[in-house]
Amino acid sequence: MRTLGGIPLNINNNEFYKKWFKSAWTYVVGAVLLSLFQIVTLATTGEPLGLTSTFVNWGAWLYIAVGGSVDKWYYFSNDAA
Amino acid sequence: MDDINTNDSSIRSSSSYKVTKRKSNINQLPFGIGLFILLVFFGVFLSTLSEKLSLFWLIGISFGFILQKSRFCFTSSMRDPYLTGGTMLTRAVLIALAITSIGFTAIKYGYFVRGLPISGQSYIVPISIATAVGAFIFGIGMVIASGCASGTLMRVGEGFTIQIVALFFFIVGSLWGAHDFQWWELNFISKGKAVFLPDALGWFGAIFVQLFIISILYILAEKWEIRKQNEE
């Protein structure tokens, strides 16, 4: 067994390590935790979690990087998202 | 932390992936601890720039970890009832919707009773034909790419090539949507009606109706799965 300064490194066989980090969780555990963090997100940031509006911004960055311009686009001028 | 030692050649099929993984038998723990330390240090660094940035960092990592560990997939929750008849994920999504509804109603009501502007209201947008068209196109894309927005990001982190391609075109498509947004807004979205349930039904009525509908859907999902199993 490998050791770290005399301490045996058998965390890989620890049942809680296996349960929390190695094995997949159940869908219901995922559902409860995702809900909790969605509520945390709204409470702390004032906005729910949103991904696609971020993708739009990434797209705009890429477009600007290759020489495009989105200044006159209604979507960005209106702040509709 | 499965996302550390995956590479493209070993995940062509899930069965060969598992075999390769067992044979190589790499201890992921040191990588995991190393990554954790890096994440914490970067979070501390972000907090020196802005408290908000480190909060986003923390929330983002939490969402990613939960999505990956629970193999949560909104695409499967919509697709599997048709494909396999399984509704376990569908029911998990309904549970998430129910819990989130209660939490969101509580937060929003808290602002309302104190006479403050209610947070997150910019996400209430009109229902129109654009919603249905967008849902249809999105549905095709998410089934082909086997991932919605969160699922695609999570699998990019795991190292899947198909979702890296999907993410790129997801971004291109989102930008295209933004480009044509004015046309959709003027012709369809502006003619639709935005509904915030508490305005229509009162706060108690809204949460009651919402949870009632979710319960009905949960029962239907379970009955659907049993019916599909009996057909086989």
Image (spheres, grey):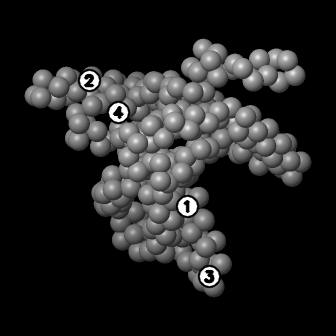
Relative horizontal placement of residue B223, taking residue B120 as reference (left or right): left
Q: Which numbered circle lies on residue A55?
A: 1
Provide the chain ID for the residue under circle 3.
Answer: A
Q: Is residue B200 visible?
A: yes
Residue at mark 4 to residue at mark 3: CA–CA distance: 41 Å
Label 2 secondary element: helix
Q: Which amino acid does label 2 sit on?
A: Glu
Q: Name the residue carrying label 2.
A: B222
Relative horizontal placement of residue B119, taking residue B23 as reference (left or right): right
Q: Position of residue B52 (x, y in %)?
A: 77, 46
Q: Which numbered circle lies on residue A66?
A: 3
* Comparing labels 4 and 3, the label whose residue is closer to the camera: 3
Provide the chain ID for the residue under circle 1.
Answer: A
B39, A54: nearer the viewer: B39
Q: Do labels 3 and 2 share a chain?
A: no
Label 4 secondary element: helix
Q: Do the residues labelled 3 and 2 touch (CB within 8 Å)?
A: no
Q: Can residue B206 be seen in this view?
A: no
